[in-house]
Amino acid sequence: MQAIPVKVKNVKVYPYIDWKGGGVGPVILPVIEGASGTYAVGTLIMSVFYNLDLNSIGQGTKLGMHQRYIATGETEDGTPFTTPWMYCTNTSDQPQFGRTIRMNKQDAESVNMGNSVVPAYITLGALTDITVSQSFPPPAIGEIMLIENGSGNVIATRTGTPHEMGVEVKGGKRYGTLRAGMKNIMITGKTTEGKMVTMGNLTCVSPDEPALFLHEFGF
């Protein structure tokens, strides 16, 4: 199911504490209050991925990169929502949070899929000599290398209007740690005809083998 971002408001973000109960629970104060932005939930194969992107929250908010947070808020029509815990993937004044839950893992949180069927993706064409990099968010300039010399395919989800396109990357040399929710991903590769293909504005939806990247769906 394609992840279509929904506009949200009155968002509060709290540090996530894995409290097992017993005694007096910890007092947890929000690190962000009254924010707005977009929240998206989507599925791909046996994964459910979550993304929360907030608009400018001003200076002084202290967030930890790759630390765990949970958020509450409302959609534009006032419907309340609560996210699962997510990793902070951008600590700027426009913070971003993301997480992928694998539904076949023993320790995965339960995900209510109703009667829906988790969709697979279709292969559109093979790629070789794949390079995956991530651009720094503005105002920074530059990028970091994530994968070199990979192989894989251009893919599209079977459901959604429009279908989401992206790249499946197998093998290659990895640098650093690839995490679900990482944004501003650019991928280049070579088709079987020897033509170079470049796809940008991708989000990592699964860092496993193979790694999966899809286009961000924005307003």
Image (spheres, rainbow, N blue to C red):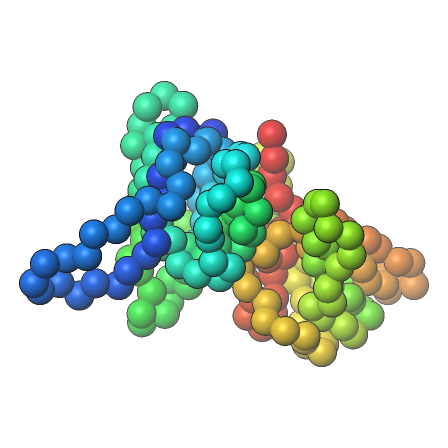
Image position, residue 181 (x, y; %): 54, 55
- Can I make out residue 102 in this image? yes
Image position, residue 154 (x, y; %): 72, 56
- Up-down relation of residue 91 to residue 217 (above or below): below
- Up-down relation of residue 16 to residue 57 (above or below): below
Write the residue at 62% across / 44% down: 216
The quarter holding residue 68 reads bottom left
Tally the numbered discs.
0
Residue furthest toward the front? 60
Q: Nearer the viewer, residue 121 or 74?
A: 74
Q: Nearer the viewer, residue 54 or 166?
A: 54
- Up-down relation of residue 191 to residue 159 (above or below): below
Write the residue at 71% across / 70% down: 147
Q: Nearer the viewer, residue 43 or 13?
A: 13
Residue furthest toward the left? 23
Image position, residue 160 (x, y; %): 55, 39
Give the side of residue 108 with respect to residue 87, left or right. left
Give the side of residue 192 with respect to residue 55, left or right. right
Image position, residue 126 (x, y; %): 77, 63
Residue furthest toward the right? 194
- Can I make out residue 124 in this image? no
Give the side of residue 148 with respect to residue 137, left or right. right
Write the residue at 70% across / 45% down: 138
Write the residue at 46% across / 51% down: 62
The quarter holding residue 107 reads bottom left
Residue furthest toward the top? 77
Placement of the C terminus among the 4 image quadrants: top right
The quarter holding residue 162 reads top right
